[in-house]
Image: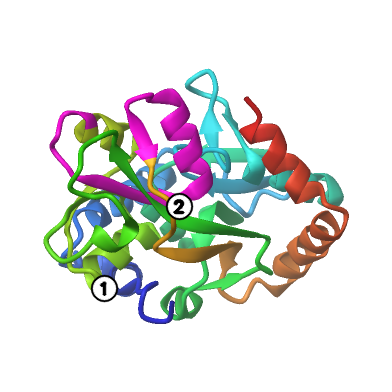
C-alpha cells in the first residue's frame, strides 16, 4: 500500500500550481480551474463561522452521490451533518472534481474534504487527516461474458482500465500495474465506455461498484480484490482544532455503529 497510494501529481500541483505545473495527469489542470473558479465566484469559504463547508465529488456512491442531480447525499454527507451539528453549524456541501476537492482543502477554500479519501504519505505532507472511518476493497468490474479479464490478477501491464481520476485505483493501475489507464470524472462514464468495448475493465471501490453493477445489468464484479483501501477526512494542514472536533464525532459514530448504519441506508435496494 505504501507504493500503491502514490499521489505525486497532487503534491506537485499544490506546491507550484500558480506557476502552471506540468503534470502527467490531465485532471490537475481541471482541478486548478475548479479551485480558482470557486474563489473567483466569491462562494462561502472556510472562514465563515456560521457554516461548515465540505468539498466532495458526488460520483462515488454510497459515500457521496446525487438523487436529483443537485442535492448531494451519502455516507460522508451523513457523517458531515453529524459533525456540523456537534459544532452548532450549518453544513454546506460543494461538489467538484476529486482533485479539486483536495486542492480546496489545501488552500483553505473549504473546511474539509470527504470523498472516499485514502491517507497516503504524499497527501499527509499537504493535508492533515482524521482517524480512518471506513475500509473498502478495490475490485474489478467487467462486461459480462467478455472473457479476457476473468480475475483481478488478469489486470496487468497494458490492460485498458477505466478509473475515476485522482483515486487510489487510478494511481495503482498507472504507477504499479502500468496499465493503459483511461480517466473519467464519473464511474457512470467509465461504465458506458466498458459496455461499448472502449476499455477492458473498471477498477473501483467495492460499494460504489455494487451500485454501478445494480444499475447496469450487463456488468459484473469479479470475485476477489486488488487491494484494501481505508478512508479518512482531510483538513487544511495545521488546523488541529477542527481536526480534533472531527475526530471526536467520528470516534463516537464508529463506536456506536452509526457509520455502519449510514452505509446500510445508502446501499439498501
Between 169 and 77, the one lying in front of the other is 169
Identify whether 20 is placed above or below 62: below
Residue 208, magenta (yes or no): yes
Query: Does residue 20 appear to the left or right of 83 in the view shown?
Result: left
Between 66 and 127, the one lying in front of the other is 66
Query: Does residue 38 appear to the left or right of 203 in the view shown?
Result: right
Q: Is residue 42 visible?
A: no
Query: Does residue 53 appear to the left or right of 33 in the view shown?
Result: right
Residue drawn 23% across the image and 65% down it: 174
Q: Is residue 265 visible?
A: yes
Locate residue 91, reporting x and y percent: 69, 40
Residue drawn 74% across the image and 49% down it: 259
In the picture as drawn, the residue positioned furthest to the top comes out as 68
- Of marks 2 and 1, which one's residue comes earlier in the chain? 2
The mark closer to the camera, 2 or 1, is 1
Mark drawn on residue 101? 2
Which stretch did the figure color magenta?
195-220
Q: How is the image coloured?
A: rainbow
Q: Quadrant of residue 99?
A: bottom left
Residue under label 1:
176
Amino acid at each position: 500500500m505504501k507504493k500503491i497510494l502514490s499521489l505525486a501529481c497532487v503534491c506537485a500541483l499544490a506546491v507550484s500550481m500558480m506557476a502552471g505545473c506540468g503534470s502527467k495527469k490531465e485532471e490537475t489542470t481541471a482541478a486548478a480551474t475548479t479551485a480558482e473558479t470557486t474563489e473567483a465566484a466569491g462562494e462561502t469559504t472556510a472562514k465563515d463561522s456560521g457554516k461548515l463547508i465540505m468539498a466532495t465529488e458526488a460520483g462515488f456512491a454510497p459515500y457521496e452521490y446525487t438523487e436529483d442531480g443537485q442535492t448531494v447525499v451519502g455516507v460522508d454527507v451523513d457523517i458531515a451533518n453529524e459533525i456540523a451539528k456537534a459544532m452548532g453549524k450549518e453544513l454546506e456541501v460543494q461538489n467538484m472534481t476529486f482533485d479539486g476537492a483536495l486542492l480546496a482543502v489545501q488552500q483553505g477554500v473549504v473546511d474539509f474534504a470527504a470523498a472516499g479519501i485514502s491517507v497516503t504519505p504524499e497527501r499527509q505532507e499537504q493535508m492533515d487527516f482524521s482517524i480512518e472511518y471506513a475500509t473498502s476493497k478495490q475490485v474489478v468490474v467487467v462486461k459480462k461474458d467478455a472473457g479476457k479479464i476473468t480475475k483481478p490478477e488478469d489486470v496487468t501491464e497494458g490492460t485498458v482500465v477505466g478509473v475515476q481520476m485522482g483515486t487510489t485505483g487510478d494511481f495503482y493501475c498507472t504507477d504499479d500495474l502500468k496499465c493503459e489507464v483511461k480517466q473519467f470524472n464519473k464511474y457512470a462514464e467509465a461504465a458506458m465506455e466498458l459496455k461499448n468495448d472502449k476499455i477492458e475493465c473498471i477498477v473501483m471501490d467495492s460499494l460504489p461498484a455494487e451500485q454501478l453493477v445494480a444499475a447496469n445489468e450487463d456488468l459484473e464484479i469479479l470475485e476477489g480484490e486488488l487491494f484494501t483501501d481505508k478512508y479518512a477526512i482531510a483538513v487544511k494542514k495545521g488546523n488541529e482544532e477542527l481536526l480534533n472536533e472531527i475526530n471526536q464525532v467520528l470516534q463516537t459514530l464508529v463506536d456506536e455503529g452509526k457509520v455502519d448504519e449510514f452505509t446500510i441506508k445508502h446501499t439498501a435496494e
